[in-house]
Image (tube, rainbow, N blue to C red):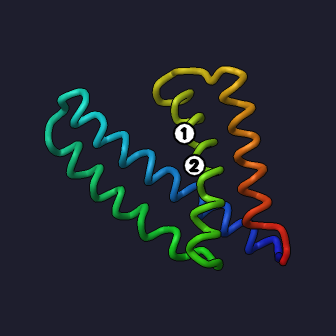
Amino acid sequence: MAAIVWIVTLVLFFLAALFEIGGGYLVWKWLKEKKIWIYGLVGGVVLFGYGVIPTFQPAHFGRVYAAYGGFFIICSILWGAIVDRKLPDRYEIIGGVVALIGALIIFYVPR
């Protein structure tokens, strides 16, 4: 796979994760922390954007979403550390690395 394709697909995975986690976070704030309704509305719009982003990946639906899971896990752990200021423990780090390795195998190993 050409380097540019690797870069584009990685950017798309991380952008999708940012949209899914960010949108879900806003809905979480609205419902769980009783923030104003605009949090839920913006969160819903952002989540819709998340649904569109993976369609730009150059693989079929199942492979994209299977691989995306590993990237989502890593990005969720990073979100928790940066936004919620909750540092991951060693098992979250180990699990995240295992999931990311699996995602890389699923998506990038030549067939």
Q: Quadrant of residue 73?
A: top right
Depth check: give the residue in front, 63 or 83. 63
25 left or right of 69 in image: left
Q: Residue at x 34, y 63 (%)?
A: 48
Q: Position of residue 70 (x, y in %)?
A: 65, 50
Label 1 belongs to which residue?
A: 76
Locate the C terminus and report the quarter of the image it occupies: bottom right
Q: Are marks 1 and 2 in contact (CB under 8 Å)?
A: yes
Label 2 belongs to which residue?
A: 72
Mark 2 residue crowding within 10 angstroms, few (<14) / some (14–19) / many (20+): many
Mark 1 residue crowding within 10 angstroms, few (<14) / some (14–19) / many (20+): some
Q: Position of residue 104 (x, y in %)?
A: 76, 58
Q: Residue at x 20, y 51 (%)?
A: 41
Locate the N terminus and report the quarter of the image it occupies: bottom right
Q: Amino acid at mark 2?
A: Phe
72 left or right of 5 in image: left
Q: Position of residue 36 (x, y in %)?
A: 15, 36
